[in-house]
Image (cartoon, grey):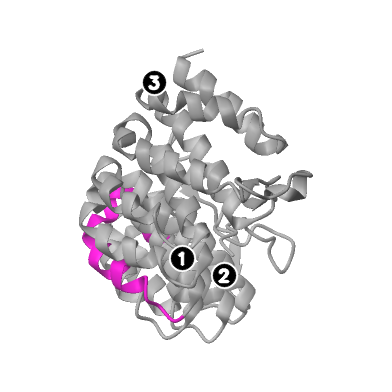
Amino acid sequence: MFATSPRSGDDGHDPHFARAEKSDLHPGRSVLNFGRVRFGRAPIFGVAAAMPVAQQHWSDLAHGLNGSLPAARVRAARELGKLGPAAVAALPALLAAVEDSDQSVREAAVQAIAHLGPTAVGSLVQLLSHTDKYVRRNATWGLGKLGPAARSGMAALCAALHDADPRTASGAAQALGNLGMAAEHAIPALTEAMRGTNVVQCRLAAKALSQIGAAAVPTLLTHVRHHDPFVRGEAAVALGWIGPAAAEAVPALLEIVRTGVPMRPADAFGGSGLGTPLAPAEPDPGSAEETSRLAAVTALGRIGPAASAALPELLAVSAERGEAIRAAAEIAVRQIRGC
């Protein structure tokens, strides 16, 4: 969806701008050759540079956004995006292209706007309320691409977590994560997003909380006790990515490791079933509960030496039959011991 590679011109030649050559009259200075450039079917005739070459370049490309062929308009938008902040003066033309009748042109225009840099944050925020879901998706991607520079768009991204389009909502979570610690005020909104029915958004919201860091630990602690094992697992993963700063989560993670072991009647092992009604069963490696255990074990290892209290439990887990959980426990033990 976010491809940016240019396509060849309709006539097989460079469709973007007249060739820059050394001037015989002005050695060492590049001027535009008097070649004809096509944007769709509308010819543009190059004129010797009366303005800097870069300015002439983006100006020609902006003109190309009005070409008669959608492919040419897409090409012009992508080339403007490649110029980055140097093409910021083309922002009005790109915003106009967002209303193009062709879907691919609209998407290419939003992607190009995202490459213009921090100056484009306000425009991308406005596009979060566009009627076209593909425009909204690309706007969230663009804000995420800008990282902490898009901090002023945080409130709009929090609102976008409720977008009717699941991909836009998930993209908003990812963009908030890319703000890093600057997104601390988004913790309540991301907390709510983790509890929703959109599993992709839940995962990305958990990742975003881990990117915010230590300030998100209390929230993630509540989620490792959630009734849904998927939410518990994603919260455990996020705590692990936070690392040593999440040391206070060790008891809660151990609780997942202990209580996640399924049980079955002891007489299934040949006993009478009297006195010891339940015994550990061989876990199902594909179950949500076992996946959450695996996440908790992995998180304890990433917390490192601060999780030394978990060593006895992890050593016991390393003797279990499940290959994945056993391997994760062995790695976690080494990480905690600093091996």
Question: What residue sits 56% from the left and 24% below the top?
Answer: 315
Location of mark 2 (residue): 74
In the rendered image, residue 257 lying in the magenta stretch gets the answer no
Give residue 242's position: percent from left, percent from top: 37, 38
Give the Cα distance between marks 2 and 3.
Answer: 53 Å
- Main structural element of the magenta stretch: helix, strand or loop? helix
In the rendered image, residue 158 lying in the magenta stretch gets the answer yes
Q: Mark 2 vs mark 3: which is more N-terminal?
A: 2
Q: Crowding near pointer 3: few (<14 within 10 Å), some, many (20+)?
A: many
Which amino acid, mark 3?
A: Pro
Left or right of 2? Residue 250 is: left
Which amino acid, mark 2?
A: Val
Q: Nearer the viewer, mark 3 or mark 1?
A: 3
Residue 323 quadrant? top right
Under circle 3, the secondary element is helix
- Of the pair 149 and 32, the residue shown nearer to us: 149
Which amino acid, mark 1?
A: Ser
Q: Mark 3 vs mark 1: which is more N-terminal?
A: 1
Location of mark 1 (residue): 170
Location of mark 3 (residue): 305
Under circle 1, the secondary element is helix
